Image (cartoon, helix red, strand yellow):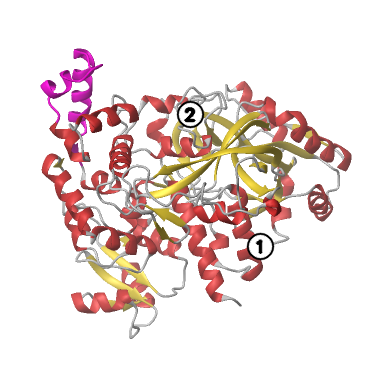
Amino acid sequence: MDHQRIEALVSQLEEANQLYAEGMSFLSDEEFDALLDELKALDPDHVFLKQVGSSLHEEEAVSKIYHDTAMLSSAKVKTIEELHKWIQWLNLPTMDILVQPKVDGLSATLLFIDGKLQYIASRGDGKFGQDISHLKNYIQGIQQSIPTNGRVEVRGELYLPKNTPYDTQGRPLRNNCVGLVNRKEISNDLSYVHFVAYALLNGEVGTSQHDRLILMRTWGFHTVEMRLCYDLNMITSVAHEYLATLRETWPYETDGLIYIVNNTELHHTIDLRKIVDRYHHYSMALKPPPQSQESLLEAIEWQISRQGLYIPIAIIRPTVIGGAMISRATLNNVVNVETLRLHIGHRLLLERANDVIPYIRDNLDKELVVKEQDDLIPTHCYSCGQALQREGVHLKCVSRTCDEVMIQSIIYWVKSLEMKEIGGQTIRKLFASGLVRKTSDLYRLTYTDLMTLEGFAQRRVERLLQEVKSTQILSSLQFLSMLGIPLVGRKALMKLNITTIDAFQQFIDDTYVIGRNVIQWRDEEHNQLFVSDLLDVLEIRDQEEDSSQVLPEIVCTGKGPYSRKELSAIALAKGYQVSNTVSDRTRWLVADDLHGSSSKLEKARKKGIPIISYEDFLGNINKQE
């Protein structure tokens, strides 16, 4: 078993999940699935494969909702032949399969008791979801009540429509939807998010999935489209129809079709045939093949990120792929430009995976190349003239005074705080004027300064200053999550127990990749100056914790008798919260080997924190009943 490769795969997949939870992505669905398939082949029993969706960290326990019926995803096949094999494996007494679109959004569930909406929860890790009930008055398609009694769950997908007027800034609709739902502050932008229902649980409404969807429509829900199939020909036909026309007619982006046994009475029996961990076995997703088209490379643009990375963008002759006009495709890094041996005028094979992300599959003319790519790959920064350096697969401008890097850093801060009065062009104008040369300068702007600029009328200046002032008071967690530390957003900070400025400054736990990122970023001198400069102009306010309300913390290490999430649930029920990091607030470190040498054990010993076994811990908390 190639343990090194397995570790690398899991690291990539976890980072992709982390970014997805923050509303971003660096892998297409196809790339993610390819890594997942490789992990399955190398280690089919790996714990990562038993996870579903985005995991919720223990520190967020107060906002977690337990799913009585797990919200699992569907297993996936890529060909009709594989789908037919699954149908044959089902061995149904009567062929009765419901087909519906696999909406490309964020799964959610609505719980009703005696007709009244109790909560809305995201899927989370399948067992525990995040309580997002505070969004109920903003998201379109959420019903506050339904005409039925008892306990009923309506499950569906949150999504942004294809024709949304929301400014997606070129990012996939799904990523924008996740970003909107995960925002800490409620915004009217949430009204762009829609809910579409695809399943009904617990209702005394018969055993037909089809009939349940019809019933939800009578309750006022927008439901997914559906088709009943009674033989293999119908199953194949709807797949071909989806690729040819259906997916273009639906208002949401899709990631294939879901085939599900229509008779719900058979679901439990089918699941008993195999272990149910990540997937139910009574449904199957058919993934669409990427749509491809040829085009010509007209130019390569290089964009500079706030970290100074040079990101190549292929400018291509406008081409229609899957109903979308494509004129740009990311190349991600300089190595891809070199590997594809690109030159202006070359024929490119473009693909649009899962109806969403365009990318370059191949250079059809790469064998014709005889000259170097000196005319396409820059050697010096176009903004500051500094010689570019190689950093992994990227070109990078390492100048700390590069105008474009500083501008991108300011733009990132403004976008993170959702300032609508200060767009990219406004920042560039303020930068060129000398009024804003670094992020903290935004908070030093005055009415007199702005009124001297062309195009800044009185009302605009007043709105801009008012908006800047409204963002001047932040919590520590807000502030730290917007520093732009690679892969470290709000959830990562909570996982690391970094919720105050002091905790950030004193953090030394390098157990996780995200922890190492925090340490490396914080210890760079220019980042220390950046933080110090912002703290000079911002007011950081944290609510004082009522010590009587703070749950005692435990930290677990090594293999215990239960999964980490089960231990978290047990601990929470007994009045403890589980943290991933040993700190001064840790009551116990629970370990499988009391004499081990892990970093958590060493840290606990230095701090004098009691170290106990899992058996002792479970015995102690059970005595409290």
305 within the magenta span: no
Residue in view at x 81 percent, y 47 percent: 80
The secondary structure making up most of the magenta span is helix
* Number of marks in picture: 2
Q: Nearer the viewer, residue 580 or 532?
A: 532
Which segment is the magenta one? 445-474
* Picture layout, residue 123 above or below residue 51: above
Instruction: Identify residue for label 2.
Output: 193
Look at label 2 and name its amino acid.
Val
Could you say where residue 203 lies in the image, as x and y percent from the top left?
61, 35
468 within the magenta span: yes
Residue in view at x 53 percent, y 74 percent: 4
Crowd rating for badge 1 (residues with CA inside 10 Å; few <14, some 14–19, many 20+): few
For mark 2, give the secondary structure.
Answer: loop
Q: Which mark is residue 524?
A: none
Q: Nearer the viewer, residue 516 or 349?
A: 349
Is residue 564 visible in this depiction of the protein? yes
Instruction: Identify residue for label 1.
Output: 275
Could you say where residue 335 lies in the image, as x and y percent from the top left?
53, 56
What distance separates the C-alpha of mark 2 from that of mark 1? 35 Å
